[in-house]
Image: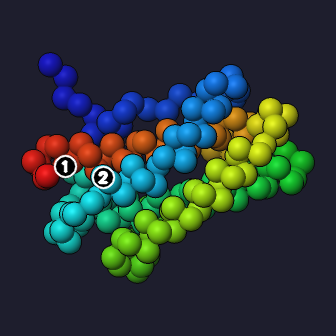
Amino acid sequence: MTEPDLRYPIGKHALGSSLTPAERVACIDQIAAAPANFRRAVANLTDAQLDTPYRPQGWTVRQVAHHLPDSHMNAYIRFKGGLTEDAPTIKTYEEKDWAKTPETRAPIAMSLDLLTALHQRWVTLLRAMTPADFARPITHPDLGKLTLDGLLGMYAWHGRHHTAHVTALRDRMGWK
């Protein structure tokens, strides 16, 4: 039997450039649900548990909790750029370095609250977008040409991906 890949507990994301209307709604619903799902995943963890890597050589649960709003703030800004600029090249950032900045050692409540507020605003934007808006192109310096549909699918996966890191760790460790 093959060992599970702890890096990708729900599998790797498959990039796509367009979504059906039903897929789009499902992705927006996943983004809307992500803050509450992640909050449940980290509920009642001790500081020692929060400081446990979700896999060998991986980030700690605390770092993941601070990473999600960092990543999703960038995503929100990428959507805004894609809606207001002509085929922009989006800015990347060094996730591994961001995960080491001083506030990533702080209590996670502020990042959970930020994620909740950010997703409320982001989902309001997403639900107001038209199919033509989702078809707008952007360029990712590493991934190449994408559409806002492709970005939507990526970030719907991203929230579930990191939530699964925590829930899989809880299961492996027997944390209730």
Q: Residue at x 23, y 31 (%)?
A: 4
Percent position (x, y) of residue 159? 46, 47
Q: Residue at x 65, y 31 (%)?
A: 24
Is residue 164 shown above or below 51? above
Q: Say which quadrant the N terminus sits in.
A: top left
Read off the residue under disc 1: 170
Percent position (x, y) of residue 84? 86, 54
Q: Is residue 2 left or right of residue 59?
A: left
State the scheme by which the image is colored.
Answer: rainbow
Q: Is residue 67 left or right of residue 44?
A: right
Q: Is residue 57 left or right of residue 39?
A: left
For mark 1, give the secondary structure: helix
Say which quarter of the image contains residue 42.
bottom left
Q: Is residue 122 left or right of residue 29?
A: right
The residue closer to the viewer here, 28 or 11, is: 28
Q: Amino acid at mark 2?
A: Ala
Q: Earlier in the sequence, mark 2 or mark 1?
A: 2
Q: Amino acid at mark 1?
A: Arg
